[in-house]
Image (tube, grey):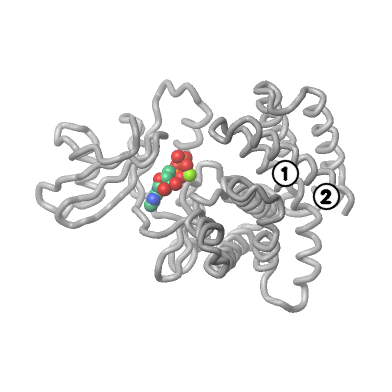
Amino acid sequence: MEPGYLGTLSRADPLYEILQADVCPSVKDPVFHVDLISKRRVYKYTEEKSRMAIIGKFFLPDDPKPARALRIKSEFEKLHKVRCYGFDASPHYVVRPISRNEKIGLALVEEFISGKNLDHFIKKAIYEKSPGPLKKTLSRLASFLSALHRRTLNGKRVDLEPVFAYYQKVLSKLAAENVLLEKERLGILKLVEKWLKRPRLSADRASIVHGDATPTNFLFTENGDVVAIDLERMKDADAIFDAGMVCGELKHAFLWRTGNPYAAEPYICHFLSSYCGPEGRGKRSAFRSITMKNPLYMALAEFRISRNNYLGRQYRRDLALEATRCLKWGLRI
Ligand SMILES: Nc1ncnc2c1ncn2[C@@H]1O[C@H](COP(=O)(O)OP(=O)(O)O)[C@@H](O)[C@H]1O
Ligand SMILES: [Mg+2]
């Protein structure tokens, strides 16, 4: 089914009662208009009279991707957990979870956020040659992420095992689909092993990270709020996991649309610099520490993106080779 308007929700649908009770108990005989937002079973419901809008995310009990079903089922708790750190109000918050019902495969009902995502500003920067709004938005995103990472910093050391396991998984897929040669895959894993032996990598303490810091998973509202959605992959990790993913996503977004591997650089520098906070004591050392670790996580993001079939074989390979260069280059810092 393609995304788009699907009609109204039947009163006989078990979801109707849930929405009526948990979303708009004061509306008499509510009518819910339904839009499919994403093929991954994400729907928007808009109540006709109150105009109240919410998002519903579903899973299949026999999902062919059981790992995703498990992740999505945990999103409700993850949202509550991170909101308890103060991310439940302007200007930085994560979307408010409202309800769920496993029996009907409903992982999450959450408030609908009206805002623009990062892709909107990336396209403006590229096609309208308007860099200002993207830079401003990246500063807003950087301040959201640095607040998240600072407030949730815990005493535990960063665990690098999952980073290696994720590299193995992503690279195996790329080799299986002939985006990378087998000998390239082995060479990249050797580079990753070198990276993971660097003392600096495991010396830092873990924070809660968003875990899927892609351009569509943050919404920027008109009144200046930054709202994170899609916290399925939230976990404890090095804070640079999120920052590196934003950098990898920026690199790809510009490379894909312009063919220029350097086009994203000013934005990446701007984002990292904003992430390190205002000028002053500590900024320089924070920036140095981040740029030392960033290539490992940025390359991971680029390899991860190059798994996407819709990008075309040649571009997927170009991006994977770019990621390999990033890993090699970073080892020289
Ligand atoms: N609370 C929300 N408010 C507004 N739009 C949302 C909300 N949740 C999801 N969306 C839209 O639906 C898309 C897919 O939802 P998301 O939670 O990111 O799931 P996934 O990326 O795992 O499919 C998002 O990129 C966004 O466009
Ligand atoms: Mg998403």
Q: Would you say 253 lies left or right of 163 here?
A: left
Three-letter amino acid code of the residue under disc 2: Gly
Please tell me which residue lies in front, 24 or 170: 170
Q: How many marks?
A: 2
Estimate the x, y position of residue 151 in percent, counting from the top left.
60, 62
Pointer 1 with pointer 2, Cβ within 8 A: yes
Crowding at mark 2 (Cα within 10 Å: few <14, some 14-19, many 20+): some
Relative height, residue 303 to residue 84 (above, below):
above
Relative height, residue 59 to residue 298 (above, below):
above
Q: Quadrant of the C terminus?
A: bottom right
User: Residue at the bottom extreme?
Assistant: 280
Q: Would you say 55 lies left or right of 269 here?
A: left
Q: Secondary structure at mark 2?
A: helix
Estimate the x, y position of residue 303 in percent, counting from the top left.
68, 38
- Residue at label 2? 330
Q: Quadrant of the N terminus?
A: top left
Q: Name the residue at 50% across, 32% down.
A: 68
Q: Name the residue at 50% across, 46% down.
A: 231
Estimate the x, y position of residue 306 in percent, counting from the top left.
64, 36
Q: Name the residue at 81% across, 67% down.
A: 285
Please tell me which residue lies in front, 287 or 21: 287
Q: Is residue 59 visible?
A: yes
- Residue at label 1? 299
Relative height, residue 188 to residue 64 (above, below):
below
The label on residue 315 is none
Q: Name the residue at 39% across, 34% down.
A: 39
Q: Is residue 207 visible?
A: no
Q: Secondary structure at mark 1?
A: helix
